[in-house]
Image (cartoon, rainbow, N blue to C red):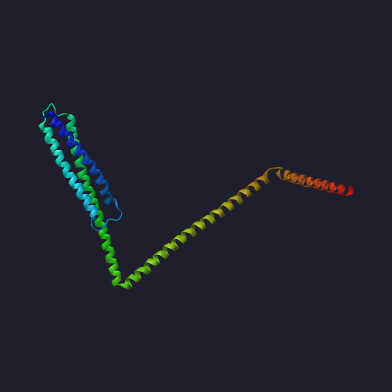
Amino acid sequence: MSTSAGTGWAQLRQQARSLETQTETLFHTYSQFASSSSVPPKPTEEERKIEAQIEDILERRESLISQLARLLDSESVLTASALKQNNLSRHREILLDQRRELSRLRSKITDARNRANLLSNVRSDIDAYRSSNPESAEAEYMLDERRRIDNSHSVVDGVLSQAYAINENFGVQRETLASINRRIVGAASQIPGINNLMSRIGAKKRRDGIILGSFIALCFLMLLFFR
């Protein structure tokens, strides 16, 4: 009897794990309907099919868990191990979590569909109003064009303001450099002997230039003379 019960327990657990794997696969497909950027106004055939399959597998798993519980209750206290109790609790927790997940995804899809239908109805109402009031539609178009032109002007004004600010910054920098140069020249003129020193340096440069020019001219004359 114990061997038969153990075999039945193992078979039921194997079926439960297999159905849990199938549920995960179906959830992966079903969640794509909830994350879709464009939800159709009505559930598609595939969406209804996947949802029905998930509900069917959840019911089958509920039945298997009940069978496992009855089988565990029928065993004696000595043979009913703590491991089996933990396995049964785990199957129940997974089933409860996935029922909650199904409810969450179903609500998310419904909310997305309601928003899409609301936007579609608003657009339809606007289009119908424009069709029945062409003058109002034309005036609205002109207002939209005016807003676009104003936005373009705002962008151009922003660019010009930045250009003026940069130009003004350059002017400030030029004035700062000129002021620094004037202070350096003024400070140099106040140092005793600095002007005399600068004059001597200038005279030495002129004298060196004259000597170098004379030497070059002499070499040139000698070259002409000895040819």
Kindly identify the residue that appears in the image at 52 percent across and 55 percent down: 166
Q: Is residue 38 above or below residue 141?
A: above
Kindly identify the residue that appears in the image at 15 percent across and 39 percent down: 64
Kindly identify the residue that appears in the image at 77 percent across and 46 percent down: 203
Residue 49 image position (x, y, % from top left): 21, 51
Residue 141 image position (x, y, % from top left): 36, 68
Residue 158 image position (x, y, % from top left): 46, 59
Q: Is residue 106 visible?
A: no
Is 104 or 181 nearer to us in this picture? 104
Q: Is residue 29 above or below residue 92?
A: below
Q: Is residue 153 left or right of residue 170?
A: left
Tell which residue pokes out farthest to the top in this image: 78
Residue 223 image position (x, y, % from top left): 86, 47
Q: Is residue 53 left or right of residue 37?
A: left
Q: Is residue 82 visible?
A: yes
- Name the image quarter holding residue 9: top left
Is 208 or 5 nearer to us in this picture? 5
